[in-house]
């Protein structure tokens, strides 16, 4: 297993950001103790959504299936500059992905540059299909600090079982080209992760995935458990090997393995800003059902501590199971990634 740490993060730490992280950790522990949300500082990790459009139609993805009810669009550099600037005092890790495929947004190289101007570590997750040589050249001018390639099969049949509308050859070509540039020294600081969602249809390829990652020279290979939304999907997709199953499936239905606790550290350390500036609690709120305000109208830290966000935290601490999206969340149960 290739599993290295993202040491590049330390280049983005400042005294103020370290102090903020200490405040976040302390306030979270106090909140757990008194069972009431106390929030100091701001999140150190934020997902800034470049777009919620996608070039694939993956069967368990609301974006790819066209099931999102919120508006479709993409963030433009002027708006993104406002979003990034509102985070730079407390955040140091920015994920330029949420729903959709980041490279659908042709402004992505400029968004990376803007984030770097605010001294933010930039991570991008992609299916790799849109990484043509021209786009890679544009990316090399100011590359992201981390690139995650989600490739869930090592041949066309297995790959297309889930990545509907894509091809293994195109996805692998994107990853291969990036690794050629990395080996040539043009991506000295970019951490490359090869992510493989384990399913019934591809679990037999796990040994080859690990060998391929080593041969390519990626920094990390991640075997990720699959998220599903129904018993039918679970029966079709979940692997035979229990090690790679996120759920238990029996006569009583489908449920996350492990024991839920009525708290969630993600609500203190991270947040999501959609392409159109809406602040939502976390990456499981895919359709932005819980919007706490818009950062183009109100400073982010004002939203972060407003009554709506605090009420959401309090409700979760009272009974996490009442929130549907939280019942399918792996926060705190240590089974999401192997």
Image (cartoon, grey):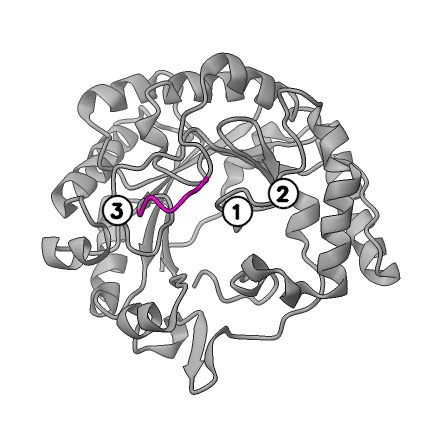
Which residue is farthest front?
69
Q: Residue furthest top?
A: 78
Residue 205 at what x, y percent from top left?
A: 21, 65
Point out the frontmost of discs 3 and 1. 3
Marker disc for residue 270: 2
Quarter of the figure with residue 302: top right
> Over which residues does the magenta segment extend?
65-69
Question: In this image, 329 relative to 41: left or right?
Answer: left
Alpha carbon distance from label 2 to label 3:
27 Å
Question: Which badge, 3 or 1, is on the more N-terminal residue?
Answer: 3
Quick one: which residue is furthest to the right in this view? 34
Q: Out of 336 and 249, give the one closest to the viewer.
A: 249
| Neighbourhood count class around disc 1 (C-alpha, 10 Å): few under 14, some 14–19, many 20 upward | many
Locate residue 51: give its quadrant: top left
Dot placed on the residue nearer the N-terminal end, 1 or 2: 2
Q: Describe residue 240's horizontal placement relative to residue 303 as left or right.
A: left
In the picture of the structure, the residue carrying the numbered disc 1 is: 283
User: Given contact means CB atoms under 8 Å apart, are the residues at marks 3 and 1 in contact?
Assistant: no
Residue 99 image offset from top left, x and y in percent: 42, 40
Q: Position of residue 12 (x, y in %)?
A: 60, 28
Give the alpha-carbon distance from disc 3 to disc 1, as whole Å: 19 Å
- Give the main secondary structure, helix, strand or loop, of the magenta stretch: loop
Q: Is residue 29 shown left or right of residue 228? A: right
Identify the residue under disc 3.
57
- Determine whether the residue tagged by mark 3 lies in a helix, strand or loop: loop
Q: Does the magenta stretch include residue 202?
A: no
The reply to whether the magenta stretch includes residue 66 is: yes
């Amino acid at each position: 297993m290739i599993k290295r740490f993202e040491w590049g993060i330390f280049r983005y730490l400042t005294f103020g950001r370290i102090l903020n992280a200490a405040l976040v950790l302390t306030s979270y522990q106090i909140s757990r103790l008194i069972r009431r949300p106390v929030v100091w500082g701001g999140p150190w990790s934020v997902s800034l959504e470049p777009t919620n459009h996608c070039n694939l139609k993956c069967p368990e993805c609301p974006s790819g299936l066209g099931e999102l009810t919120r508006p479709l669009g993409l963030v433009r550099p002027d708006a993104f500059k406002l979003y990034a600037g509102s985070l730079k005092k407390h955040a140091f890790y920015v994920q330029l992905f949420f729903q959709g495929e980041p490279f659908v947004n042709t402004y992505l190289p400029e968004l990376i540059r803007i984030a770097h101007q605010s001294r933010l570590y930039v991570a991008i997750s992609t299916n790799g299909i849109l990484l043509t040589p021209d786009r890679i050249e544009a990316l090399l001018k100011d590359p992201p600090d981390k690139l995650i390639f989600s490739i869930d099969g090592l041949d066309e049949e297995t790959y297309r079982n889930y990545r509907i509308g894509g091809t293994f050859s195109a996805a692998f070509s994107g990853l291969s080209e990036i690794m050629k540039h990395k080996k040539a020294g043009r991506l000295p600081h970019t951490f490359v992760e090869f992510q493989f969602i384990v399913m019934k249809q591809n679990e037999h390829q796990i040994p080859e995935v690990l060998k391929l990652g080593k041969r390519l020279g990626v920094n990390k290979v991640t075997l990720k458990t699959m998220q599903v939304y129904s018993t039918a999907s679970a029966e079709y997709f979940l692997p035979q090997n229990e090690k790679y199953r996120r759920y238990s499936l029996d006569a009583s239905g489908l449920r996350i393995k492990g024991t839920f606790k009525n708290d969630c550290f993600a609500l203190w350390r991270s947040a999501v800003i959609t392409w159109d500036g809406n602040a939502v609690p976390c990456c499981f709120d895919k359709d932005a059902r819980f919007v706490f305000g818009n950062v183009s109208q109100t400073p982010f830290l004002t939203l972060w501590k407003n009554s709506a966000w605090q009420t959401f935290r309090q409700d979760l601490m009272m009974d996490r199971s009442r929130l549907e999206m939280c019942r399918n969340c792996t926060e705190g149960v240590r089974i999401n990634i192997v």
